[in-house]
Image (cartoon, rainbow, N blue to C red):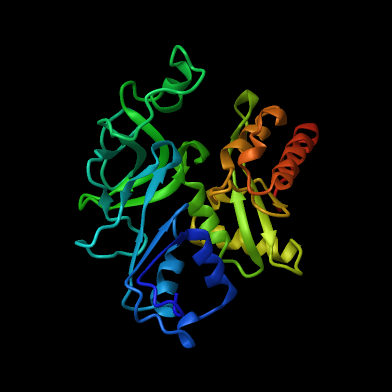
Amino acid sequence: MAQNKATFFGTGAGVLTMVERSGVVPNVQEDFSALRSILVTGSPLPDSTWDWVYQSVSDNVRLGSDSGGTDITSAFIGSNPFQPVHRGEIMGPYLGVDVQAWNAQGERVWDEVGELVITKPMPSMPVYFWNDLDGSRYRAAYFDMYPGTWRHGDWVTQSKEGTFVVHGRSDSTINRGGIRMGSADITHVVDQVPGVSASMVIGAELAGGDYYMPLFVVPEPGRALSDELKANIVTAIREHISPRYVPDEIIEAPAVPRTRTGKLLEIPVKKLFQGADPSTLNRATTEDAEVLDWYARTAQSYTARGPRPTE
């Protein structure tokens, strides 16, 4: 960007977080005076990375984030040039999008976590799926919870000022004792623990009403998931979130599974631990199919032995 005097940079949240965690401070030796805007997408951007951009890239850049979906080839909420930037917040709906946060009863909520819904049609919404002659798969994908209203599967909070905070996928939401939290809220804390390169957490509802919440941790290169690192992770979760969200098990993983566009594959992994057949996985869309295969084997091993509790 510095060499080409770029004015606009679009990137994935994971890219900026990776550079932040590496300790690099780009503006020490590079000139970003031409840069006016950075737009981030793909996943929620941690608060620490928002701060890092203004401290280590440019204190005069306009940092924005958006959230949408491949299914609509567009975005629902994002930034615009007329509103102020606030750490961790998306400014509001894009033009022509009636986006709201709803509770489980289908009521609009403000300043509390809810489902992201679209209450009026958008021009780029799909109207049917291929080989879905009766429309059942299409309705199940978007309209199962609120008939007639599109539920996208994102867990968000909308403030009364109109801004949004995205907490992660609602169908990958962690549910401990009836209190729900976005998985990204947990992994953001875990990823800040020294020695952790990346992490992913799932909450699997099991037969008989059981619930299993494993945390997968990718250690930094050259390190292993030692007892000390596990203890530091547990402490971070207890202090920054709640003891309620200490995982049932912390498992060392070779990597976190992602799609080719960089999104975490939490939901397919969750289904594996709930007993889904690995043959149902869409390996073609994954960034690294071998990583997804590792999770399939781990899920099968769990099914055979049961969990090992976190100490």
Indicate left or right for 96 with 221 as reference: left
Visible residue check, residue 242: no
**Looking at the image, is 119 positioned above or below residue 49?**
above
Q: Residue 37 at what x, y percent from top left? A: 33, 68
Above or below 292: residue 239: below
Counting from the top left corner in percent of width and height, residue 248 is at: 65, 45
Task: List x then y, in percent, for residue 240.
Answer: 49, 61
- The residue depicted at 52 percent of the width and 72 percent of the height is 20
Q: Nearer the viewer, residue 26 or 112?
A: 26
Residue at the limit of the structure toward the bottom, as seen here: 29
Q: Residue furthest front?
A: 4
Question: Residue sitting at 62 percent across and 32 percent down?
Answer: 271
- Answer with the quarter of the image where residue 100 lies: top left
Above-or-below relation of 59 to 147: below
Residue at x-position 34% and y-position 25% = 146
Task: Give percent across and percent down for residue 244.
Answer: 53, 48
* Residue at left offset 28%, top offset 65%: 85
In terms of image quadrants, where is residue 59? bottom left
Is residue 207 something that shows in the picture? yes
Q: In the image, 114: left or right of 244? A: left
Whether residue 56 sits left or right of residue 254 in the image: it is left
Relative to 178, residue 78 above or below: below
Which residue ends up furthest to the top in the rendered image?
A: 134
- Decide if residue 259 is on the left or right side of residue 99: right
